[in-house]
Amino acid sequence: MSRLEAKRPSLCKSEPLTSERVKATLSVLKGVVTSCYGPAGRLKQLHNGRGGSVCTTSQSAALLASLPVTQPILKILTTSVQNHVSCFSDCGLFTAILCCNLVENVQGVGLTTTTAIKLNKHLLSLCTEYLKSEICGCRIPIDFGSTQLLLCLVRSLLTSKPACMLNREEVEHISTLILRAFLLTVPENAKDRIILGKSIIVPLKGTQPIGSLNSVSPSSYGSVKDWCTAKFGFKHFFHLIPNETTVCSLLLCNRNDTAWDELKLTCQTALHALQLTIKEPYVLLGGGCTETHLAAYIRHKTRDEPESILKGDGCTQTELQLMSEAFCSALETLAGSLEHDGGEILTDRKYGHFWSVQADSPSAVNWPDLLSRCGCGLYSSQEELGWCFLRGAHHPFMPQTCLPREASGSANDLTLDCFTAKLSGLQVAVETANLILDLSYVIEDRN
Amino acid sequence: MVMACRVINKRRHMGLQQLSSFAETGRTFLGPVKSSKFIRDEECHESVLISSAVRLLENLDLTNAVGQLLNEAVQAQNNTYRTGTSTLLFLVGAWSRAAEECLHLGVPISLVVSVMSEGLNSCIEEVVSLHVPIRNVFDLTDNTKTFSGLETSNVSLFPFLQIPSGTGLRQEEHDLKDVTSQSLAVCSLSGRPVKSPKLFRPQAKVETDKNTSQTPQVLKNSLLADTRCRKSVLTHSRHFSSRDDNHWISKPDGFLEQRGAAAPKTYRCDELVELEVGLSHGDHSSMKLVDEAVRLQCQSSGMQHGSSSGPFLLDISRLFTWCLPGLPETFSCVCPGYITVVSITSTAVIKELQHQPTRVVLIEGDLTENYRHLGFNQSTNIVTVSESTKFQQESLEELWTSHVLQVLIRFNVNLVLAQGSVSERLIEKCTQSKRLVIGSVNSNVMQAFAEASGAVPVAYVTQVKENCVGSGVYVTFWRNFPFDAAVQIQRIAIMLKTEGMNLVTVVLTSPIPAQMQAKEDRFWTCAYRLHCALKEQKVFLGGGTVEFLCLSHLQILAERSLHKGNQGCSEWLRNTSSWLASSVALYRPTVLKCLANGWHRYLSTLLCNTASYSSECEASTFIQQHLQNAVDSGSPLSYILNEYSKLNSGIFNSGISDKLEEIPRVYDIVTPKIEAWRRALDLVLLVLQTDSEIISGLGHTQINSQESEGFLFL
């Protein structure tokens, strides 16, 4: 016997962002990603509560993969971030936090959604144009004649993942290994279009995947130069030595499984970041300096030449100021998320960099006594730079653009970020925030 | 699917508290005197007897995340080194408490992490000076000095802990000459009293002050400055130096040397027995078996290569343990070759095969009709349909069995060793045709037979070719245990041997079946310790000296950074540009003190467990006393070494027979110990930095209402 059941009507919710429940879950997610951010970020234990393996991590890739969410708005956010991570590996948390901050800040401004989205787009293009321009003051061109900056990039990536449980020496060692592995994958006689080799996973070059062993045509065989067995620690390995020199294996060890998983993921990210850097040979200043510098730049630009930004598309200058404030403070809050131990953030009025200081420091204090170096490590506090609290109200200023070449050459322990990944993260964050702000209905099929 | 997210680090750190409470359960396993525990399952009323940290965690229901991480850490240590797990477990507890203390005192988490790793690393660099090199222990191996001869000296398990409970701290005035009257006298086999060496004797204080004033400044400097990778040889005259000319000098290469009245002698371990006793940590019965095994391996390798080049190592992969519960301990023994049991029905076959070389085939998997190798994918879309499946199944097996038999006959194979299980029907058939098939053979044993007999292991019998067949294996009965026991179990023990095979079977017996597992574990612990010591060619001076050096070193570091406000070590901080870098100096003494407290707890528990002290408080006072002496002396290392040399010269001066001069020192193995420390701290810091727990796949209903506090759903 069969019977027909009537279809249940779909559930339609209007203005989903105004719901308290959505706001609450969004703030939980924001709390989770924000607390993970940076070298001092806190770790999360992920498990299924039924005795499954426990993963301790602070990386967006691992975190979002095991964070099943039900709220449609949260789903949009996590999916965009995962998409970004699958293409660029790095800057996932950056994207997620910035997106959350933007949604929250724009809601507080009270402009119509259309205006807010339009202005957000203007501000985004202002950012990307500046970051891509020659005058950009937070970008360093990479000279492949020296490994110094590349090593800094890898080191910064490793130190930003505390769950790898590496000490200073181990970070140095593994950074060097990763860079060496990467350089081995770069072919010696590069033509116009460089095809990079691979590391970690060793493909047998020239072989064709075959369906079964029944009919093997000679063309589907590849060849290896040699093979041997090798013993590392307590494990035996089968080592295939290929004809091409652009294939290498990187062997990673760690004391426990969870730290090892984290290290594997981090190394893949670092190798990917290096590959991206070879395509676009720039790095961005890390440690929060790019964000604060960019915020200072945008704030000054919107105040100084609003007409050139608005291009007469119907938005008023007041609306632009309001949105610019929301946008810049989203960037600054993001930079401030690097602090997890109760310190406070300063910025300087010369470069617009990020400086961290102990909480409750008197404001009339002689700052150079308390400060050492800025977040990225480029500037020291010896110079009088005119510090002020990042969150305090202050007049917009134009941060110094055009990074002098010698500045990057002198410091050897800079905190750097992958240029391509961060630029994409910025775009994804703003576009996802716009999408979320633009949602007017959520229609749920309950059948 | 719903995600629940719980913030676990609001006011008190739940993760750290869980760690320390789990670790507390293994407190009594620390040290050589381990009290066993019963774990009872309330549901099925089964119970297990355990006496090690690994077995404890294995049998506990650790379903929460922190417990699981702890179990993983302990298992990883055990799988790699088979030792150091109790230390690991204890230190996890001690340092979780230390980390929590730091949090209570308001130290930022990032600073706890960086200063604790810095502190432990500094300790690890410091203890390098307690390395004792092992040199050619096999050169001096003679059969006159065997392990059992030294068995009675087990009173000196832990030189650190030698003060008998009767001796109070008040007896400071006593001179070393009174050593006879104070020492714990025990009877050796020969009936003569054996002196218990006392490293940290109460009168040490007076002596130390005198000695340190004589310590050349250069030594102090070198001790404090050169801590990077000093590979030191501790030299001192064991026999001739008197206390007054204990001058520790630093050689230009950074090695430590003590110049006495006579020519300097290297302080090293060059006798196998001495090393074994030192590493046995009181478990003489297990170490005795290891000793026999290593001698057998040494003999057979000596026969193979003549004079072997390089130091001889104990080959762990050529040791095989065979447990026989129900027999008295005295039946435990070590034999060359492979010992196993077969069904009593095979007696006739073995009689037939005895006294002649046998040809052997090695099978990697199961020896059954339906076995397929790993990675084999059965075609899923083919179903065999038959009227009588049972009949067909039987005939299939019958067909396969006769096929296997044909192969064995063709290659004239009389012995088959399979790693997996073997079809009963095949065993039956083979027995009829005078062939022996043995299943469930350990992979190391297979490898040993492959190497010695020339056989090549194959996955299926059909793959057997002439070049896969090994030869020269001898099968005999093994009748070292009472026959009635054999009849009871309806099985007989046999021994397989091949020329040049250095496989050694260790037969372990225990009258109480519940203790069998513990006995096997203890044997492997001893075997791995000796293996590791021989491989690394060095050991630590044991008995708590290493931990004591760490404790006093951290104490000094903490005091020094308190006075100087040392700015130099912020390099341990991950984020050097943060404000934390400039506040390290402020918090360093606190964090280092807390870390040192962990060592303090370790040592007091050790003393308490060995029953040297009735209460932990008493033990703690004792440690505190010596800590003060060591710190006051300026160089804890010289303090410890002086105590050691005094111990030896004291024994010598008291004029007891030569034999007693061989007071066995206690040794610890180097890498497993340090790895246990590192793993412990890594785990604590990992949990310390964790602020929330994300549980996937939980519905709202699955969390109890009382538990649901603190859960957030996405």
Image (cartoon, helix red, strand yellow):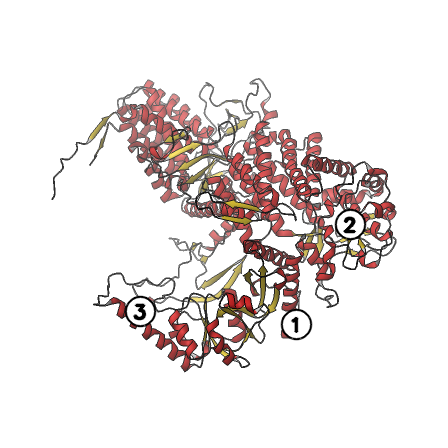
Mark drawn on residue B302: 1
**In the image, what residue occupies the spot 40% across and 27% down?**
A330
Label 2 CA crowd tier, 10 Å (few <14, some 14–19, many 20+): many
Tell which subunit mark 3 falls on. Answer: A
Mark drawn on residue A216: 3
Locate residue B88, reporting x and y percent. 58, 45
Mark drawn on residue B196: 2
Check the image and report above or below for B357 versus B111.
below
Tell which subunit mark 2 falls on. Answer: B
Amino acid type, mark 2:
Ser
Label 1 CA crowd tier, 10 Å (few <14, some 14–19, many 20+): few
C-alpha separation, residue under disc 2 versus residue under disc 1:
37 Å
Q: What SS does tag 3 mark?
A: loop
User: Dividing the image into 4 quarters, which one contains the C terminus of chain B?
Assistant: top left
Between residue B613 and residue B472, name the one nearer to us: B613
Looking at the rendered image, the disc whose residue lies closer to the viewer, 2 or 3, is 2
Looking at the rendered image, the disc whose residue lies closer to the viewer, 1 or 3, is 1
Q: Mark 2 or 1 closer to N-term? A: 2
